[in-house]
Image (tube, grey):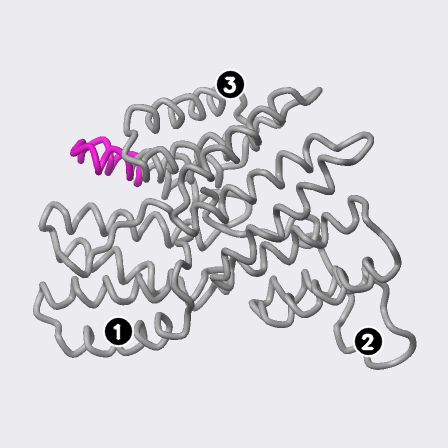
Amino acid sequence: MSNKVLLGTMCAVLALPVRSFSAGREPDPGQLTQAAGSAFQSGNFALAGELCTAAIRDLEAAGVTDHRLASSLLNLGRVREVQGRCGEASDLFLRAIRILEAAPQPDPFQRSDAWGALAKAYNCQHQYSKAELALRRALEIEQSAPAPRSDQLVELLAGQGGVYEAEGKFAEAEAAFLRAQSLLNQDPRVDSNRAALLLNNLGALRRLMGRYVESEAAFLQGLSLAEAAATWDLGLEVGLLYNLAALDVERKQFREAANHFAKAVRLLDNTTSLPPRTIGDLLRNYAACLRKVGDRRQATTLDTRAAALLNSQPDGNGRLIVDVTELSSK
């Protein structure tokens, strides 16, 4: 799965300040959507959700039932997913899909994106069979489009491989990852972050298969790509470091694992896109690793931070990186 949740068109460059809403007439749904994008990018997910909800309310009040309403539903669904409210997210995505599928001339790319978003929400809830079906539908739509997007195909195949892995279908997972890698080799214009995400998932799969040398090589290659990407995706870099630490723990290399965890935690101060549960899991597992090397004081501090984050979240919140291992039980 994609490691960073984006708001589609809401992630464009936005200039409208939310404070302008306090004066003059009430803003239209387009303005609300723009402001929601700004709030999302700044990490104010509660405000982003309120603004998306207001945009949907205004569209429905005006009798709008076309792609504009579908886009607003998708945007709110992505906000809810980041907040860990994945059941609500899947309901919103389904509403958007029904609108898009009923359109006289449906946009294949918007439909593919919507089905892919639904798959992420199902994966977040560990409903892997539903996620598998949603990804299959997204791939069918994307492949039948007049000009399929290579980067979207790569992301969908990476997600499909992650779902297969969660289901224990390792051969099918590796086939999906290798198919995605083949597409990358054919189209070097694909964003480096997508290539890094694919390598992350491939590395995690090979770790589960006991192929540790291949796993580490994939993680390190992915980390190199993520660091060199034109747009630096800190969430992805955190995930790769997290998975490198998981591999180190499995090989009983606890000091190396602690180093990778430490690098990941230092990056947390520079990104607001990671869900609280993902951060809580990272801190908790880092604490478990530190206890292995005898640093109990720092481990206790990290456990306290992790508990505050994890206790504030609803059950069923999905991880950004689908293949991260629970380390606290090691």
The earlier-in-sequence mark between 3 and 1 is 3
Residue tagged 1: 302
Q: Using the numbered discs, state the Cα–Cα distance from disc 1 to disc 2 in whole angstroms.
A: 40 Å
Contact (Cβ within 8 Å) of mark 3 with mark 1: no
Residue lying at 27% horizontally and 62% vertically, measured from the top left:
262
Residue lying at 76% horizontally and 32% vertically, measured from the top left:
106
Closer-to-camera residue (319/222): 319
Name the kind of residue labelled 1 in the image.
Answer: Leu
Q: Residue 245 carries which label?
A: none
Q: Residue 186 carries which label?
A: 3
Give SS at disc 1: helix
Q: Where is residue 244 in the image (x, y as percent from the top left)?
A: 26, 47
Position of the N terminus, as image quadrant, is: top left
Q: In this view, does 98 lie to the left or right of 158?
A: right
Dot 1 surroundings within 10 Å: few (below 14), some, or many (20 or more)? many
| Nearest to viewer (mark 3 / mark 1) | 1
Name the kind of residue labelled 3 in the image.
Answer: Gln
Q: Give the range drawn in magenta.
A: 204-219
Q: Where is residue 10 in the image (x, y as percent from the top left)?
A: 69, 54
Q: Is residue 177 left or right of residue 10?
A: left
- Rendering quarter of residue 225: top left
Residue lying at 55% horizontally and 31% vertically, measured from the top left:
190
Question: How many circles with numbers are drawn on the protein?
Answer: 3
Magenta highlight on residue 207? yes
Residue lying at 75% horizontally and 67% vertically, measured from the top left:
54
Characterize the magenta stretch by its predominant secondary structure.
Answer: helix
Q: Is residue 157 above or below residue 4?
A: above
Contact (Cβ within 8 Å) of mark 3 with mark 2: no
Position of the C terminus, as image quadrant, is: bottom left
Residue tagged 2: 20
Q: In this view, does 329 lie above or below 54?
A: above
Closer-to-camera residue (328/263): 328
